[in-house]
Image: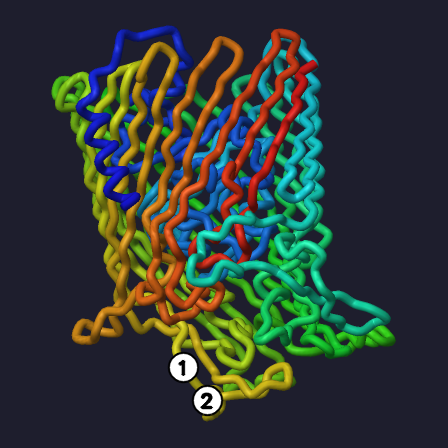
Amino acid sequence: MIKKAMIALGLMTVMYMPLQAQNVDTSDVESFDEILVSAQRFDQKRRESPRQIEVLSSKRLNELQPATLGDALINSGKVFVQKSQMGGSSPVLRGFEASRVLMVVDGVRLNNAIYRAGHLQDIITIDPFILDKMEVNFGSGSTLFGSDALGGVLYFKTKEATLGTKKISPYANVRYLSVNSGMVVNGGVQFQLPKIGLILNATCSNFGDLQMGKNSYYDVDPNFGLMPKYVTQMNNKDTIVNNEDPYVQKGTGYKQLDLFGKLTVKTGSFMHTLNFQKSSSDLIPRYDRISENTNGVFTYGRWDYTPQNRDYLSYQLKFGSDNHMNRFTLAHQNTEVGRVTRNFGAITERTELDRVTMNTYNFDRHDVIGNFTLNTGIEYVTNDVTSKGTNKKITDNTETVTKARYSDSGATTKSWSVFAQAIYNIASTGTVVQGGFRVTGYDLVANFSKSNPWKLPYSSIQFSNIAPSFDLGITQMISEYLMIKGSVNQAFRNPNVDDMTKVFDSKKGVKLLVPNDQLQPEISVTSDLGMAYTLPNKFMFEVGMFHSNVSNLLLDQKGNLNGKDSMVYDGVNTPVYQVTNVAIAQISGAYFNVKARLYKDLWINASATTTAGIYRKGTDSLSQPLDHIPPVYGQVALRWNGKSWFAEFQTLFNGRKDARDYSNSGEDNADKNPAIGNPAWQIYNLRGGYTHKSGLSVQLAFENLLDLRYRYFASGVTAGGRSVSCTLSYKF
């Protein structure tokens, strides 16, 4: 029903002839000339890109008032996001998720050797307050960015430390979110001199437990999602207690600190930039695990991510002219992910602590000769992984060494790449043709001690591969306002340390993943076809379709270790599974976006995306539902732009996901939804903001106005109920 309504709305909007132009913020209607940062690694006009690209500016991020960057994506209505806990967000691009979606910050990849194929939460370590913009590049992106970009690239561009007339600009933001009694305090200062620029920024977030809506969407089970009881420690003993408010999801709150600094110095014709980012959290409870119970019997007494830290330091050197630019980037990143788990009633808790050190070396060159643009580059990336396991008795704090999550004697990956991207602009015909090619070499070595508890039949896992990737695209201006575009792209994902060496009970007593030393890269070929029609400051309509074929798809399959098909893990005999290249997959879908002026400064903005995916274990086998495929989703918003204020009414919606359409892999978390599947839902939000000439601004939002209770597909935590959010900002 929702899908049909959105199609009808799109057709009506196409037929609508906008009124005469008024003076408005031109960012409300996208221009074909909009400058993008990430599409070709250097600035490129929107009309030259054959890709579907969505942009969230810093202004829009502030209007959405997100608790995290994942929440900003959710409220944009342009990207589907899965959540296992409040301190998590796992974006899904065109049916691909986690390690099959590449995240890039200021030209440096964030995906490391232990990004898993299930659900991730790393995006919340990027502070929304430090971003100039966030770009979502849909579709294969391996030619320019390498492995992992099967579904697309999330590109985060941080604010620039600008040069110019001497100026000191302090600023502060305070945000309150009633749905979790959350407080976000942000402050910083920007220094500007003719040859030196500096930004310093700090954000402290403190979120309480998340409250769900009281009006259930689950007709077959009106009490679905409620938390009448929860587990707590009393006298060093796990105890089940009654929840005073069953609409409060106990064990979802957490704290986080984010720091950012950027220094830019100009020496002659050289531009030097130092970029520092740090994100740390005390502990982030994994709600889907700590709430897991059968007939009131809880599985876990504790399940926390602690710590979850990310450190980032880069140096960038730029020199040359606009038409002949060189850029050299060195980046060093440290990531720490800890998992502390304890079965309910047990006195021993296990800590898995994984550390990754990643170094990146990039050299890019940008040349423009007449109507011809050539972007070339080389890249070298290393990952060093250490993984440790510790058992601790909570009664006396004694510790012993136990199983690590990954190879217990360390693992390394090394990757080198060379690439080139050519763009030819035929101005006389309005045609832009582009094509690119990349070659990537990759090596992985993971070592296991002789005393490893798994008694593996090998002491190391080694993998080497050279993978080509390519893209070819065209955009054609049919008229001054109408453009069509199409592209074909090949992408790949090399198996990483998580794929090849992980030991993890995906579901207690049901699935235990163990290492596999026989894996090959996943390869996808994606075709895109789209059309866009724009009347500047009046109207924009974009529609497109996409299709991906994936070979060597990695899936969890029943396996064996040392001839045994099950093992005792945490005291429970559990079937053994291994990640294996066993399938081919097909993913297809369509999207549309529309923006139009209805009257003076009143605008409508709507978007919708639908995706379908299947896989087969061989060409002659029956097709099965692919995991990570969201139902139809999108948003419709009415917005009035004043001179110094705005008001917006928005509805976010998701379609129904029937139980028969869930993957049997377990990644869709069918057990976290009613037996019939996830019902369709629709929520309503109201936002507004005002900026005074003094520099003081206030943003106010009322979200989920009807206080509806719902979950995003594949999520293990219920979304927030009715909420009031307020942000006070001041630029001194």
| Quarter of the picture holding the C terminus | top right
Say which label, 2 or 1, has the lower sequence index.
1
Instruction: Name the amino acid, label 2.
Output: Asp
The image shows residue 599, relative to residue 429, as above or below, that is above
Residue 689: x and y in percent read 55, 20
Residue 615: x and y in percent read 27, 66
Q: Which mark, residue 94? A: none
Asked if labels 1 and 2 touch by Cβ distance under 8 angstroms, the answer is yes
Q: Could you tell me which residue is drawn at 22 percent across and 74 percent down?
A: 618
- The quadrant holding residue 193 is top right
Q: Mark 1 highlights which residue?
A: 558
Q: Dot 1: few (<14), some (14–19), or many (≥20) neighbours within 10 Å?
A: some
Secondary structure state at the residue bearing disc 1: strand
**Viewer-proximal residue among 200 and 3:** 3
Residue 188: x and y in percent read 70, 26
Secondary structure state at the residue bearing disc 2: loop
Q: Could you tell me which residue is drawn at 34 percent across and 35 percent down?
A: 53
Answer with left or right where residue 425 lies relative to residue 177: left
Q: Could you tell me which residue is drawn at 61 percent across and 32 percent down?
A: 725
Answer with left or right where residue 217 lies relative to residue 44: right
Q: Mark 2 highlights which residue?
A: 565
Answer with left or right where residue 697 lies relative to residue 711: right
Q: Dot 2: few (<14), some (14–19), or many (≥20) neighbours within 10 Å?
A: few
Q: Report whether residue 433 is seen.
A: yes
Residue 383: x and y in percent read 55, 57
Answer with left or right where residue 483 lies relative to residue 110: left
The image shows residue 127, relative to residue 166, as above or below, that is below
The image shows residue 547, relative to residue 575, as above or below, that is above
Instruction: Name the amino acid, label 1.
Output: Lys
